[in-house]
């Protein structure tokens, strides 16, 4: 008889089968096999919140096959992912297969390599019921909030709305930031920037006005700036003070789930959902030429910075062979301290085999897999390299008694920066450059002194990277929930994404206001963070999951009943739901509604009048291929792209917005490419023309056309986008 090993995905099963060899049958459960029914609450509140689990629809045949395999197997090992969710899946499988929970049949793999699989199989244990209870508590808690609160929001604001314990707080954080931006009152201030040339040199360097011998001077007006410039006119500046120093920069720690999502967003432009999908593929195993299926990274859901000694030794040897002894830290391996609330269940995210350099296996990876693997590999290797040493220079320039300050550096030893430098959310850090050789009392020549007007800026809107960072710092959610949370709040229309920026819609703001007024605890950052700590306490076996739910539900239920009573008959109107259109069948105003395929316009007299028209987002640009108009469409995942209104008769489609400008080289249409430096580009084969774009984006207007006249069905519209590959 063979031994049965059950994992979650076919890719993982294939990789593990390779390492276990004959005598083992490795099959996939395809994720959860049992769950709460999605169409009802499925929690018996009166019976201590007893969950009513059932087979997931469509998995009946798979369940029967697993039962048959288990009955004829010598042993059954449950090898689902090594986290709360994986533990719960193993628990459900044990129930389905009739396994004894006291048996040691649970195995986990931190990495899908031969060593990782052998280590896991050599240390079977019992299912950790505390982990299971923590997952159950979270699942039921979220179900109670979602299924009790969502109908209330749908009734008071808009049909089809949902509430979530974590998603509602995430929206509130974004809404609060937007309110701060609106309330912000900019203050004027001025700076004076100078460029000097040392005597006997042609090297120009920059310096910023600081003040005088008494201290810093704040320049509030243009008149004040001009007075200072007049006072320094025709002066002879000189170097009054000069100081040299050494600055050592340390490498960033290896990735945990949250920092991987942040850095992938900043460096690669990946949304968190995309990052986690690719990371899962790298963990479960990729077919590498000459090697077969190989798990390339360790488990990607972790909040620990711990690294195994084997991995540290392998990194040390690689760095020594690649760059030499001087690129290793002077005091041996680097160890990083995890956050105080980290669960520390797994290592940090790292490559399973250091010798598998990204460039060596590029041919076996997709573009996304290569980019993310390269990011993880470089970050891990860099974290075990020597620090970067910079020689710094700071100079005080005296101009008629006023002080300008200049600073710069040169790299004395590149250290880890030879391989990797961490990105930042903003470019606010002072930009330094190397200064020319300077000496104390050295005379300088003024090339220019320019006054510059500035205004204080409001706090920036969140990006995915900065929102994930905020959620982590507040202690809201867990690493595995960030991607799903952001995906939910954008797909539900509470938050919009423009480029990388997240901002609330009117729906998000109205919903948050209602939640703050009626359910303050649900959208309270501290309360939600405390709930996460309570769930951790359940996992540690120090708090019963029923007790946690009881403590939460009593107050929640009372608050919900009071809100229903106080708002009986109240309906909140949204400005964004109104239109200027009049129904051509009954004369009543038309309103925006939301359906399965997105927005549409319907008569406000429904159900007496059932007139419906479809939303068309036009941008005022003719189609480059035919006589139609370019309109904004969406993929099934909600990403905007541009297509022709004559689809399917015209197949024009582009991720980039076409413009009215023609390419000066070939005469083709130029397209807008967004980014830090927006560009106009030509996509014609063999052309390659591009230039910086300083024009404003076209205003997208929503127009309605009769649904019966529009030949593009929503399903066709989305499939057109899904066939488009990303540039």
Image (cartoon, helix red, strand yellow):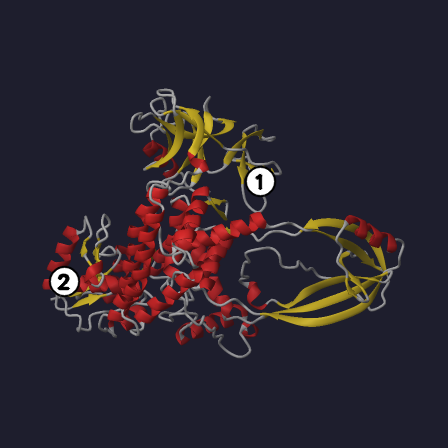
Please rate how many residues cluster around mark 2, counting C-alpha atoms within 10 Å: few if below 14, some from 14 to 19, many from 20. some
Q: Nearer the viewer, residue 376 or 513?
A: 513
**Is residue 292 among what the camera can see?**
no
**Is residue 489 among what the camera can see?**
yes
Q: Position of residue 53 (x, y in %)?
A: 19, 57
Q: In the displayed structure, would residue 387 be above or below residue 209? A: below
For the N terminus, the image quarter is bottom left
- At horizontal 38% and vertical 45% (from top left) the residue drawn is 492
Q: Which residue is labeled 2 in the image?
A: 97
- At horizontal 32% and vertical 55% (from top left) the residue drawn is 145
Q: Which residue is labeled 1 in the image?
A: 679
Horizontal side, residue 92 vs residue 183: left or right: left
Q: Nearer the viewer, residue 552 or 375?
A: 552
Residue farthest bottom in this picture: 331
Q: Position of residue 721 (x, y in %)?
A: 39, 37
Q: Position of residue 232 (x, y in %)?
A: 86, 56
Q: In the displayed structure, would residue 221 be above or below residue 303? A: above
Q: Secondary structure at mark 1?
A: strand
Tell me, for residue 306, which label it has, or none: none
Residue 575 lies in quadrant: top left
Horizontal side, residue 75 vs residue 556: left or right: left
Residue farthest top in this picture: 585
Q: In the displayed structure, would residue 349 be above or below residue 425? A: below
- At horizontal 42% and vertical 35% (from top left) the residue drawn is 577
């Amino acid at each position: 008889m063979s031994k049965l090993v059950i994992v979650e995905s076919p890719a993982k099963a294939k990789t593990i089968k390779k390492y276990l060899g004959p005598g083992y049958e490795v099959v996939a459960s395809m994720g959860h096999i049992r769950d709460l029914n999605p169409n009802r609450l499925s929690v018996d509140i009166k019976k201590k919140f007893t969950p009513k689990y059932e087979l997931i629809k469509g998995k009946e045949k798979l369940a029967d096959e697993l039962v048959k395999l288990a009955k004829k197997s010598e042993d059954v090992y449950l090898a689902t992912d090594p986290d709360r969710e994986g533990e719960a899946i193993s628990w459900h499988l044990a129930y389905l297969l009739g396994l004894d929970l006291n048996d040691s049949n649970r195995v986990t793999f931190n990495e899908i390599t031969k060593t990782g699989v052998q280590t896991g199989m050599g240390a079977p244990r019992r299912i950790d019921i505390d982990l299971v209870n923590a997952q159950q508590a979270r699942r039921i808690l979220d179900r109670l909030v979602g299924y009790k609160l969502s109908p209330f929001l749908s009734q008071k604001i808009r049909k089809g709305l949902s509430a979530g314990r974590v998603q509602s707080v995430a929206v509130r954080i974004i809404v609060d930031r937007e309110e701060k931006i609106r309330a912000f009152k900019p203050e004027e201030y001025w700076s004076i920037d100078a460029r000097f040339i040392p005597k006997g040199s042609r090297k120009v360097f920059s310096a910023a006005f600081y003040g005088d011998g008494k201290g810093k001077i704040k320049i509030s007006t243009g008149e004040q700036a001009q007075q200072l410039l007049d006072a320094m006119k025709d002066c002879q500046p000189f170097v009054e003070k000069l100081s040299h120093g050494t600055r050592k920069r340390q490498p960033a720690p290896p990735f945990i789930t949250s920092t991987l999502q942040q850095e992938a967003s900043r460096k690669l432009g990946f949304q968190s959902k995309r990052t986690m999908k690719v990371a899962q593929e790298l963990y479960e195993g990729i077919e590498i030429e000459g090697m077969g299926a190989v798990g390339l990274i360790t488990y990607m859901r972790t909040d620990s910075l711990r690294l195994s000694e084997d991995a540290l030794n392998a990194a040390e040897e690689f760095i020594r062979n690649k760059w030499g002894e001087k690129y290793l830290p002077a005091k041996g391996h680097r160890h990083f301290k995890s956050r105080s609330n980290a669960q520390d269940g797994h290592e940090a995210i790292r490559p399973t085999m250091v010798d598998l350099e990204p460039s060596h296996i590029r041919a076996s990876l997709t573009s996304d897999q290569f980019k993310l693997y390269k990011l993880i590999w470089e970050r891990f290797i860099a974290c075990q390299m020597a620090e970067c040493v910079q020689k710094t220079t700071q100079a005080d320039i005296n101009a008629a008694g006023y002080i300008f300050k200049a600073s710069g550096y040169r790299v004395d030893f590149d250290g880890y920066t030879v391989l990797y430098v961490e990105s930042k959310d903003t470019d606010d850090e002072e930009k330094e450059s190397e200064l020319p050789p300077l000496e104390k009392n050295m005379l300088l020549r003024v090339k220019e002194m320019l006054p510059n007007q500035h205004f204080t800026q409001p706090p920036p809107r969140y990006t995915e990277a900065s929102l994930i960072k905020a959620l982590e710092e507040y202690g809201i959610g867990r690493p595995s929930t960030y991607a799903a949370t952001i995906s939910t709040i954008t797909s539900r229309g509470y938050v919009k994404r423009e480029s990388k920026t997240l901002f609330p819609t009117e729906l998000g703001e109205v919903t948050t206001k209602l939640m703050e007024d009626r359910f303050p605890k649900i959208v309270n950052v501290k309360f939600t963070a405390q709930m996460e700590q309570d769930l951790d306490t359940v996992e540690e076996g120090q708090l019963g999951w029923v007790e946690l739910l009881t403590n939460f539900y009593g107050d929640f239920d009372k608050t919900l009943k009071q809100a229903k009573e106080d708002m009986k008959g109240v309906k909140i109107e949204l400005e964004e739901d109104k239109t200027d259109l009049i129904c051509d069948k009954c004369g009543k105003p038309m309103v925006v509604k939301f359906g399965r395929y997105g927005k549409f316009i319907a008569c406000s007299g429904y159900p007496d009048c059932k007139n419906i028209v479809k939303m068309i987002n036009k941008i005022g640009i003719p189609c480059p291929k035919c006589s139609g108009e370019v309109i904004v469409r969406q993929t099934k995942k909600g990403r905007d792209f541009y297509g022709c209104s004559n689809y399917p008769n015209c197949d024009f489609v582009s991720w980039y917005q076409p413009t009215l400008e023609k390419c000066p080289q070939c005469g083709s249409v130029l397209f807008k490419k967004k980014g830090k430096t927006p560009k106009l580009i030509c996509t014609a084969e063999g052309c390659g023309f591009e230039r910086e774009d300083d024009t404003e984006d076209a205003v997208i207007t929503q127009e309605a056309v009769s649904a019966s006249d529009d030949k593009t069905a929503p399903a066709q519209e989305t499939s057109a986008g899904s066939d488009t590959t990303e540039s």
